[in-house]
Image (tube, rainbow, N blue to C red):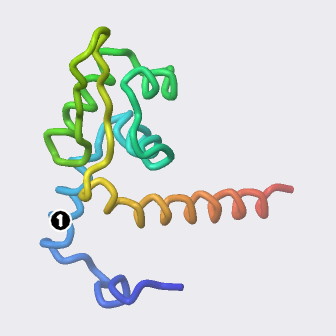
Amino acid sequence: MSDPRLAERKVPKIACVEDVQDAISVLEGRWKMLIVAHLYGEPVLRFSELRRAIPQVSQKMLIQQLRGLEDDGVVTRTVHPQVPPKVEYELTELGRGLGPVFLALLDWATLRRSLAAASEP
């Protein structure tokens, strides 16, 4: 099914492109989409759980990406005053608003796999 908003805009208007560019700038980077995806799977994750969930990312980079997402209002960070410190992350309302984007990406991934399989000899 085609989205009527796409049919209305055969050629993207500059404002539309600027809005998309603004949205992408919040999520750009190698790890931010994966971080958000993991937070969709579990509503609250400790830093150590995120670190284990994405073993390819360095601790420094994970901290930077989480800070960026926090600055942009996508995740919240809660520090529990205990020893050792317990730091938890969860999606904000704005972050949860990305749900349709992730569903669309899942649909696209399925379509891509099926087209690739159909083109194989």
Picture quadrant of residue 10? bottom left
User: Which residue matches tag 1?
Assistant: 19
Specify the farthest residue to the right. 121
> In the image, is residue 38 above or below residue 104?
above
Residue 49 in the image, given as x and y percentages of width and height? 46, 26
Q: Residues within 10 Å of mark 1 (few under 14, many from 20)?
A: few
The amino acid at mark 1 is Asp
Residue 97 in the image, given as x and y percentages of width and height? 31, 62
Is 13 displayed left or right of 44 in the figure? left
Is 15 displayed left or right of 60 in the figure? left
Judging depth in this view, the residue of 85 and 22 nearest the camera is 85
Picture quadrant of residue 9? bottom left
> In the image, is residue 12 above or below residue 21?
below
**Picture residue at 42% right of the left edge, 43% below the top:** 39
> In the image, is residue 56 above or below residue 104?
above
Residue 61 in the image, given as x and y percentages of width and height? 31, 21
Judging depth in this view, the residue of 86 and 8 nearest the camera is 86
Q: Quadrant of the C terminus?
A: bottom right
Residue 13 in the image, given as x and y percentages of width and height? 18, 77
**Picture residue at 59% right of the left edge, 57% below the top:** 109
Label 1's element? helix
Specify the farthest residue to the top. 83
Judging depth in this view, the residue of 98 and 110 nearest the camera is 98
**Picture residue at 27% right of the left edge, 31% below the top:** 65
